[in-house]
Amino acid sequence: MTAIFKFTNMKPCCRILLPSKNTLFLPRSSNFLPNPNYCSAFQLHTSAPSSFGLKAILGRTNSAWGQSRIFSSSRHFNFSNRSRTPFLVARDAPDLRNFSASVESRANDKNFDRIYVQGGINVKPLQEEKISADERVEGGVNVRKSEWSREVGKEESEMEKEAWKLLRNAVVTYCGSPVGTVAANDPNDKTPLNYDQVFIRDFVPSAFAFLLKGEGEIVRNFLLHTLQLQSWKKTVDCYSPGQGLMPASFKVRSVALDDNKFEEVLDPDFGESAIGRVAPVDSGLWWIILLRAYGKLTGDYGLQERVDVQTGIKLILNLCLSDGFDMFPTLLVTDGSCMIDRRMGIHGHPLEIQSLFYSALRCSREMLALDEGSKNLVRAINNRLSALSFHIREYYWVDLKKINEIYRYKTEEYSTEATNKFNIYPDQIPHWLMDWIPETGGYLIGNLQPAHMDFRFFTLGNLWSIVSSLGTPRQNEAVLNLVEAKWDDLIGQMPLKICYPAVESEEWRIITGSDPKNTPWSYHNGGSWPTLLWQFTLACMKMHRTDLAKKALDIAEKRLFLDGWPEYYDTRSGKFIGKQARLYQTWSIAGYLTSKVLMEKPDAAALLFWEEDYDILENCICALSNSNRKKCSRRLAKSQILV
């Protein structure tokens, strides 16, 4: 067998820009002094809590200096033929004393106290390692090529070649290594604002494209660098949000040093610079989803098993599963906390956040390692999955039959057995919906709160509900039936509408605050976003409706390349390029490429979606056998599946 030799070498190290009063310096020991040829400054500014112990810089191992305490342990090499660590999935219904979804401040558990001190500072000397020719080396880790990672025999079209060229040109490097892609890379744009930054949500389709192409190094680097940013102290007007918050974006900046030298630093934005100062709730959820996809498509499950990565997952979940005043299992968020990052009336419990939350919970349940510190967390995950699944399937779903039921609702019911549990007034049903809803389709509404249902169709939330199996199989099929029946409205001349319909006139003034960017049928207010194409393709492939995905791809191919890969399109049918749309938008390019590769590699696509999980349905937490309630989430969900 042909063999090559690989040496574990150190790359130049850099700093993460963490403005804080508490600055940690590494000890002035010969073991910690860096090679001056590689690094001009070796301090890491951080405000990590004391329970995390000493944190070293993101680094590689080298005999000249100490091993990073964050990214330590030599077991992360040569994992390709190693079996995975068993993971815990609780199947039994929990004890009634454990109904709370809270993680009980698990950041103070003993496991968290030790989490960053494992591995020590001893480093093995530079070693020669033999690897086979069918393996590749990425980020210091051997990753065996999967079948779907190999080049497809089909020759790429000129449009695909140009798209790959543009995507690679959008790559951002940090200390010589790729760490993400900028949001837009228009050479003629003189005022990029924050479009020259790496956004977590924007990078996801780029990451999927690279992973499906067999290029995992950039994704691995992205996951680890953003994980390091998670511990940064975030403050807006003297107030700090939860510890597990992931940044919305980051930028690589050059900072001047003495003697005309410069150093690269990572400068994160957690929302303190964003329009409206809104924290990015979806960033942590996307990070967990991408982490699972990376393992599935590269075989590098060792990344998930690392102590620092396990801690990052737990911190995000701790933030999401904390107890509060809410009576519902859905996440309560402010307006603008997801892809729709401006005021659009989605505050409360928007579907997009709930579908990503559900996906992140399922990902976490797969990836959390089996240990004493994770048992309570896994129990909380299972409880939340069961409650969230029932809540969305039962209360967010609308079709012709359900709308007719709401139309006949009685109000002001005071009873545990009330039919109209949220006191929805029938007059809330918009006139457009009565004529628009087809007989054979349905969808999950955009939001649900007391006395309020947002009947708008939000594409991302519905598509990701299909991908994650948040909806029942019957509901998932009905969503695609609706898209097919209302093709001109939701696809039109450019896929896909971010929401339907647009809010107009007085409603627009009240809901958006007269936002000049979110005018009717523009941007987030009914605009058409090509990046949603990859999620539509994945949903269609799961439901065996590739005909719909192919049809949408054909429409996009007619215009995207010629129009310069716009961020979004305007008008009711998506006829015009958006009035403020950036050209050469990276996630428009990546969304198209990911869709194309997914269609060519169905085996890889099958690794990225979830089938119905009957363990979730069995995990009934409402203890109906000891109560007088009539409905049970487990029984209802099972009955829906059998329909």
Image (cartoon, grey):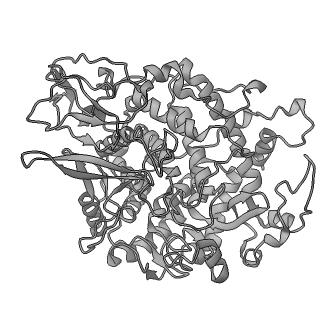
- The answer to whether 350 is drawn above or below residue 174 in the figure is below
Residue 446 position, x and y percent, is 66, 62
Residue 530 position, x and y percent, is 45, 68
- The answer to whether 273 is drawn above or below residue 324 in the figure is below
Query: Do we see residue 75 in this rendering?
Result: yes
User: Residue at (50%, 52%) from the top-left corner?
Assistant: 279
The image quarter in which residue 562 lies: bottom left
The image quarter in which residue 127 lies: top left
Left or right? Give the position of 361 relative to 606. right
- Give 588 or 5, whichever is nearer the viewer: 588
- Give 537 or 340, whichever is nearer the viewer: 340
- The answer to whether 152 is drawn above or below residue 52 in the figure is below
The N terminus appears in which quarter of the rendering? top left
Query: Do we see residue 135 in this rendering?
Result: no
User: Residue at (72%, 37%) from the top-left corner?
Assistant: 617
User: Residue at (25%, 46%) from the top-left corner?
Assistant: 265
Residue 18 position, x and y percent, is 33, 43
Left or right? Give the position of 78 relative to 521. left
Left or right? Give the position of 543 relative to 407. left
